[in-house]
Amino acid sequence: MNQLILGDCLEVMRKMDSESIDLIYLDPPFFSNRNYEVIWGDKGEVRSFEDRWSGGIEHYIAWLKERVTEMHRLLKPTGSIYLHCDYHANSYIRVYILDKIFGENNFHGEIIWEKIRVKKAQSKEIPNIHDTLFCYSKSNKYLYYPPKTEISETYKKSHYNQIDSITGKRYQLVSLLQQGQGPARLFGDKLLLPPEGKHWIWSQDRIDLAINNGIIVFTNPKIPRYKRFLEESEEKGIPVGDIWMDIIPVNSQASERIGYPTQKPEALLDRIIKMSSNEGDTVLDPFVGGGTTVVVADKLNRNWIGIDQSVQAIKVSEFRLNKQQGLYSAPFVVQLHKYDYDTLFNQNPKIFETWIVERFGGRPNMKKGSDKGIDGKMQDGTPIQVKQSNSVGSLPIRQLVTDARANDKMVYEKNILEGKPIAYFIAFSFGKGAIQEVARLKNEENIIIKLVTVEEIVPIAKKPKLNVSIKDLGADGKGHREIEFTAEAESETEIEFYAFDFDYNEETKIFSAEEILNKDGKATNKFKAGTHTIAIKVIDSEGLEAMEVIKIKVNGEVERE
């Protein structure tokens, strides 16, 4: 199940299975020693910031190394890790963390990503315009698909500047030599020995074929080159090296911009994920930030897990995912410190069953079709049933006895013999009839069924209360009316931010926010004539949310339904 998890990634990763992840991308907080490193400003992030800065570079490296060690454990043998950092600590990170944990032989590249296009003059300092990404693998069996990029028009004109006299196709002349000593080859009637320390890159058969086809050209009697045609190069693309200047950073005009200062462009993660994973693989981002990794992984049909200590990071990532969710999108869950009763109670039943069984320590039943009353099993095979209900009565208890016996008679009889529960029953609450039936089964038939409430598994809290008012600001002279929305919320904790969806779809129930990190609860939008549905959410410091949906009619004036 795809997951967004609120918490310290170290604690979360320690509970995850070894060798369960195919690709890890992490963009941890940089060792910049600046207050601007606090992005969101909520309690989780500030606490993490303070932890990292209780000491100098040694403390920072120890803090990061502990987490990267867990990441190494989680990676499959074919897995890779990309660690994003900058000049403040990149040399320390490579030598004292990555080389130590993954091994120098599993280092596969230092990628330089140009993140700043406009170079500003700095007194006595060379302008810093790039970040570094280190790539390591778990073993020598790692996945790797060389990235390619399109050929620009400028490059075509400057490099493919020759025309074949027979075909009329554009081409460039390319060397047939590479490093490493090799034997002589026949080029027609010429036997040519490569220069010292070099070898001819083609076999004799391929050279013979190229000579016959007129592809090899001699720029002088001892230097053969081959014609690389533009048409062929466009099909294959240009191999990408370790300097990435073609990925534009997120600026103020970018359509994907969410207002997160260190937000990474989707193109960057698109390239990394395609380089080192296949569809269906699992991608982990332990510092999910603005959610770019999980958003792109979701688009590329990868499974994913995103972790962050910041409530705002998790909720912003959730809203970005919601915005791209379609009919066939894979479901995902958001794991918080506390959970809202109404949200859990009304969640998709299959998603809820899978999630609560995992939280209970069991293995969910992932088979399609009828589950025959068994929604999961404990590690010893004891069945688990889940009812997304209150006041469960006696009839489901009696039925569970039948289902447990039919599911696995050996486990059923073994549990009775050892005085253990023959099944676990999870629900929001149980009625008097269920409690009495459990007692009767134990006393009269020596059958134990363990009743477990959802609140015993995960903490439940009250979500905030929200009230929204509107104000007509008048016509804009272009057939639209501008309306101001004022959201006011109350919570047992602090309010983090508001979000606004000015075109809410009541059929899909998907909240697709146009404005996310709104701090004061005020937002304006222009509407054309007609009926409009608007949804407003408020998020508190526990990650719990409340939503109000309002309808307005615009026709000369504004009317709220």
Image (spheres, rainbow, N blue to C red):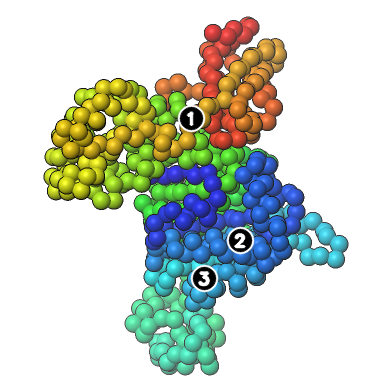
The residue that disc 2 covers is 63
Residue 392 sits in quarter: top left
| Three-letter code for the amino acid on which mark 2 is drawn | Trp
Q: Classify the position of the C terminus by image quarter.
A: top right
Identify the residue at the far right of this view.
Answer: 123
Query: At numbered mark 1, what does the secondary structure look like: helix, strand or loop?
Result: strand
Residue 461 to residue 424: above or below:
above
Disc 3 residue crowd, few under 14, some 14–19, many 20+, Cα 10 Å: many
Q: CA distance from mark 3 to mark 1?
A: 40 Å
| Three-letter code for the amino acid on which mark 3 is drawn | Ile
The residue that disc 3 covers is 101
For residue 164, which numbered disc appears in the image? none
Query: At numbered mark 2, what does the secondary structure look like: helix, strand or loop?
Result: helix
- Of 13 and 423, the residue lying toward us: 423
Is residue 371 shown to the viewer in this render? no
- Of 153 and 109, the residue lying toward us: 109
Residue under the image location 40 percent in, 26 percent down: 346
Q: CA distance from mark 3 to mark 2?
A: 14 Å
In front: label 3 or label 2? 2
Residue 99 position in % (x across, y down): 55, 73
In front: label 3 or label 1? 1
Badge 3 or badge 2: first in the primary sequence: 2
Q: CA distance from mark 2 to mark 1?
A: 33 Å
Disc 2 residue crowd, few under 14, some 14–19, many 20+, Cα 10 Å: some
Q: Classify the position of the N terminus by image quarter.
A: top left
Residue 16 position in % (x across, y down): 42, 54
Residue 432 sits in quarter: top left
For residue 340, which numbered disc appears in the image? 1
In contact (CB < 8 Å): disc 3 and disc 1: no
Badge 2 or badge 1: first in the primary sequence: 2
